[in-house]
Image (spheres, rainbow, N blue to C red):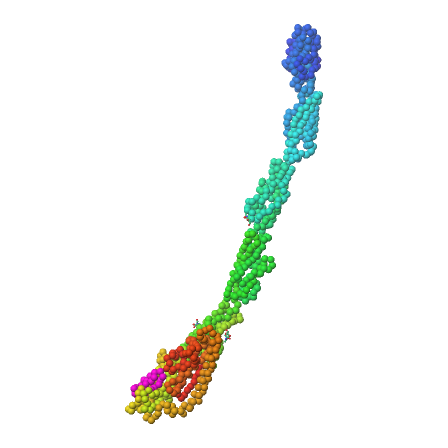
Amino acid sequence: MEAVITIGRRKRIVLLYLLFLWHITEAQIRYTIPEELKEGSVVGNIAKDLGVGVSEISHRKLRIASESGKEYFSVDLGKGELLVNERIDREVLCAQSVSCILPLEAIIENPLQLYRVEIQVLDINDNAPNFQNHKNILNVAESTALGARFRLESAQDSDVGSNSLRTYTLSKNDNFILDIKTGKDGSRVPELVLEKSLDREKQSQHHLVLTAIDGGNPARSGTAEIDVNVLDNNDNAPVCEKASYDIQLEENTTRGLVVVTIRAVDPDEGANSEVRYSFGPHTPEILQSLFSIDATTGEIKVTDEIDYEAGTSFEFDIVATDTGAPPMQGICSVHIDILDINDNKPEIILKSLSSPVREDAPVGTVVALISAKDIDTGDNGKVHLTLQSDLPFALKPSISNHYALVTDKALDREQHAVYTIQIVAVDSGSPRLTSEKEITVDILDVNDNPPRFAQQLYTVYVKENRVPGSILCSVSASDPDTGDNAKISYSILESRHQGVSISSYIYINSDNGSVFSMHSFDYEKMKTFRFHVEAKDHGSSSLSSNATVHVFILDQNDNAPAVIYPSAVMGSVSHQRMPRSAKAGHLVTKVTAVDADSGHNAWMFYRLVEATDMSLFSINLHTGEVRTKRAVYEHDDSSQRLVVEIKDNGETAQSSTVTVDILLEDGIQEPVSDIRQKNSDITKGSKITFYLIISLASVSVLSVLTFVILLVKCARNSRGRTSCCVRRSDSDDYKNPNRNLQIQLNTDGPIKYVEVLGGDMLSQSQSFGSCLSPLSEFSDFTLVKPSSTIDFKELNVLDASLPDSAWTFESQQVSAQ
Ligand SMILES: *[C@@H]1O[C@H](CO)[C@@H](O)[C@H](O)[C@H]1NC(C)=O
Ligand SMILES: *[C@@H]1O[C@H](CO)[C@@H](O)[C@H](O)[C@H]1NC(C)=O
Ligand SMILES: *[C@@H]1O[C@H](CO)[C@@H](O)[C@H](O)[C@H]1NC(C)=O
């Protein structure tokens, strides 16, 4: 009767209702059956259990009613057996409750009787444990500590009791173990425990299978797959492909060139494996300005001009950092060697220059110190210096790349005052680079040149009687030196002329070399003189030179002819006598005059200006001979007076007169006896005549001798020549003055006068020859007629006309010395 107690409230209502309708028997029948019986399976013989005979079954209409309405069972009216009408699933009927009782009513009519029948449905292991999710994903960070637990989904088993879930198993794996916890209600909860640390980089996913096993016999199981994803942890630093990169780079590399690409690998994934590149923390800024690194690609590029001379190699670190958190870093080093190219010109450095250089500097004098430099290396930095070859300088190499510029030849400032020396430096690179430098070297003057006169010999013609202080000439000298070394002072070298100091004749302007006279000169006293001028420079040891000035004084017609014969003693008239018997042409007398001037100025003309009887006498224009024109008549006055004018040939002619009284006498003889009569007079001068003749003879002999010697010499010296001429140049005339003696003889009968002529210097303008020709056998000894028409000026004959009885001899010493 305990079943009643267990009936639910709803059933009780139904039961009350039934009680109301029918008599409810207290009898209770219970059958126990396993679930899942086949249809038609016999649960039990209900008729028998109810005490109803088989014959009564159909009569009393035994039937089964289910409270739930679902007809799981039926009654076999023939046998009175309770049969399974429909599949009974305990899990549907009773879910998880351990006892599952299906209440039934057995109804019998006639009389109506109601019986309670309970059918206990026993569990059979017909359900396997089941996981709700057959695929599970578990994300586990790889850094998870050992022992960490991950709760897994429990499996469900509809069966109850021993058929329910009993345990779990886990597929074999390296990292996890399974731990099953039992809850307070006895439920079992599987948990994964990390037993060995995970490494995503080794295995990023673990496939586990969890199997739930129930306690049935045979046991049934259900599985669930568990995919354990190992979550990446930034536990790996990026690693460069190479620990160090060695690169060689030419120094003139263009900007933007990729030098190298750094690649670092990070086995992590995602952000943890994304690598960013950067320079190491202590990379100098200068280096960072030369190179750049692309953060993402790792390309190292040239960003600035690479200059070998600024740095021959670079070493720096590249840091590869991943983007994980925390970031991990890897470091690699880059070594860049810069290769030198010949990109630098050699440089010439002037260390010292001693300019100006004295022109008398000895060969080898150091003028400048020069060094050459090329900042390239190797051959690119080897420098060679060269010099223009035509300069008097040389480069002398001294210690490494140092040179001394020295003089190579003697210098002469007067030829070259300034040198521009071009020095060329060439390096040995390829291609060669050159540079040039100009050095200007001034040459310092040294007083090495004496002043030089424009002429060594000056010839000056000066008219006599000029006012004192007038300019005679100007000499000039030049000095190729400079400055004081070229500054010239002129002076007259002291000498004496005719016993008088030359400085009393002339003075010189010491600045410009103008020579002035201090006297007026008188040709008749001094025809020529010479002096030496000196030019002296102002150098510290002064140099000088001299020149000779010859002054020739030119004659002016400043002297009137002077009558020598017939001598008029103090104003008295000269008296001459002649015989009355004289015939026409009788030489009465000869008027002789001298003119102190020379040349034309001394050329005299004689004229009769007055006569007692003009028809009786005539005078030779040139000779001054007074002759009778006709025979003397008886009636002619015995005293005749003649006035003779003597006039010279000067520009402004000068003249003088002489008065001659002639006495016509009957008794006197011819002029021959006249001479004899004058024997006493002649003997008076015979001694002088004798000496003169001796000296003339010796001069003649000397001359002839000289010519013989000359002839021999000429013949030897010029065999090939047609003639032998010795030409005397101007200067020869002075150096070897050849005195030209002329003797003029009166050829008109007895010697009335002798003229001794001395050739002189003024003829220097005419160079006359001493030639061996038939016409001039005695070139230096010439006979000329008194009335010769030879130009006196050219011949420069010194006349010394002498009266018959009183001979004088004037010798002119006219020579350079
Ligand atoms: C670098 O220099 C070399 C040799 O002088 C030359 O051949 C080359 O063209 C240069 N490169 C650049 C980029 O200027
Ligand atoms: C030299 O100087 C003097 C005086 O000053 C002058 O009379 C003369 O003409 C000058 N001579 C020359 C050649 O200049
Ligand atoms: C003039 O110069 C010459 C050399 O040129 C020298 O021999 C001579 O002695 C000099 N004369 C005088 C007077 O100084």
- Tell me the quadrant of the picture where the N terminus can be found: top right
Quadrant hosting residue 643: bottom left
Q: What is the total number of numbered labels drawn onto the structure image? A: 0
Instruction: Report x, y in % for residue 162.
Output: 71, 21
The answer to whether residue 800 of the structure is visible from this angle is no
Asked if residue 620 is among those painted magenta in the image, a careful observer would answer: yes
The answer to whether residue 608 of the structure is visible from this angle is yes
Instruction: Report x, y in % for residue 182.
Output: 70, 26
Q: 376 or 780, which is in the foreground?
A: 780
Q: Which residues make up the magenta segment?
A: 607-628
Q: 94 or 485, which is in the foreground?
A: 485
Q: Is residue 482 left or right of residue 274?
A: left
Q: Is residue 256 left or right of residue 728?
A: right
Would you place residue 306 above or below residue 816 in this image? above
Would you place residue 688 above or below residue 289 in this image? below
> Could you tell me which residue is drawn at 55 percent across and 44 percent down?
256
Asked if residue 90 is among those painted magenta in the image, a careful observer would answer: no
Would you place residue 703 above or below residue 368 in this image? below
Instruction: Report x, y in % for residue 429.
Output: 57, 53
Residue lying at the far bottom of the rendered structure: 667
> Could you tell me which residue is drawn at 46 percent across and 81 percent down?
704
Instruction: Report x, y in % for residue 744.
Output: 40, 83
Q: 647 or 773, which is in the foreground?
A: 773
Would you place residue 352 above or below residue 30 in this image? below
> Could you tell me which residue is drawn at 70 percent across and 14 percent down?
31
Q: 281 or 110, which is in the foreground?
A: 281
Q: Is residue 588 left or right of residue 33?
A: left
Residue lying at the far left of the rendered structure: 635
